[in-house]
Image: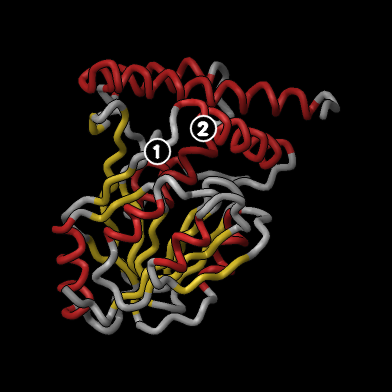
Amino acid sequence: MNAPGISVLILTRNEQRDLPAALESVAWSDDVHVFDSYSTDATVEIARAAGAHLHSRVFDDYASHRNAALAVPFRNPWLFILDADERPTRELSAEMQRAVAAAPENTAGFRLRRRDFLFGKWLKHAQISPYYIRLVRVGLARYTRAINEVLEVAGPVAELSYPLDHFPFSKGLAHWVAKHNSYSTMEAELIVHQQGLQNPSLRTALRHPDFHTRRMHQKAFFYRMPARPLIKWCYMIFLRGALLDGAAGVTYATLQSFYEYLIVLKARELRRGGA
């Protein structure tokens, strides 16, 4: 299957474990780019062996780094943005190719549902943020927010029906914890230095048609709540129904609450003048 209308962008940093399967999942594209942060493992060699275009840049923050990647000269008018631990299903790959062929000229992007997996189980209920814009017209997208970045698209966004599979624990629990330890530091700095949304709207948080806009306002309110880690755990377990995902759902909710607790502790430390 050939899709000359869609380029692919994969951002990497020491992804020798996940990159081969990611590249295989987008073998239908004639223009695959790997944007690497100077990996020290075999990531670069794997990308070159697969025939991908290779780019390197020192990582600074997530939004700036991804915006630099979006400035790469792509061959095609559409771009599919993929992480190394993600795999488009065959149905999604075919649907994307049909969608760009039939898209109205004013369509700027497509939103899809991502399925997170833990212990081989889809976290259908526990997953908090399942919808992402990943297929965009080149030149019409940019990232904001230095951590847990948001992709903004200049124009209407349509919906895709088939899922993108995500394996965030493919490198093990220790790797997930280490990564979120780093994330929590950046989140705490954003909170303390007030770089987040300053005047959130409850109406926007509850009723805005765009999922990411709602999430941005919801998160701003959430950061002002006491006992956030406990609230998050109860919300995930009981309101979202993480219990229905079994041991994987309970584990995921507990890990997410631990991540929230790290943000609370680090923000408190920063306010007290700590490191």
The residue drawn where x is 40% and y is 53% is 19
| 5 over 173 or under it: above or below | below
Please name the amino acid that badge 1 sits on. Answer: Pro
Give the total number of marks visible in the rendering. 2
Q: Quadrant of residue 262?
A: top right
User: Residue 263: horizontal and vertical position, in percent?
Assistant: 62, 28
| 189 over 209 or under it: above or below | above
**Image quarter in which the N terminus is found:** bottom left
User: Residue 178: horizontal and vertical position, in percent?
Assistant: 58, 31
Q: Is residue 115 left or right of residue 151?
A: left
Residue in the foreground of this view, choosing between 169 and 160:
169
Within 10 Å of disc 1 (Cα), the crowding (few <14, some 14-19, many 20+) is some
Q: Are marks 2 and 1 in contact (CB under 8 Å)?
A: no
Mark number displayed over residue 168: 1
Question: Where is mark 2, residue-wise?
Answer: 175
The residue drawn where x is 60% and y is 66% is 56
The residue drawn where x is 53% and y is 28% is 177
Q: Quadrant of residue 69?
A: bottom right
User: Residue 252: horizontal and vertical position, in percent?
Assistant: 38, 24
**Image quarter in which the C terminus is found:** top right
Furthest residue toward right = 273
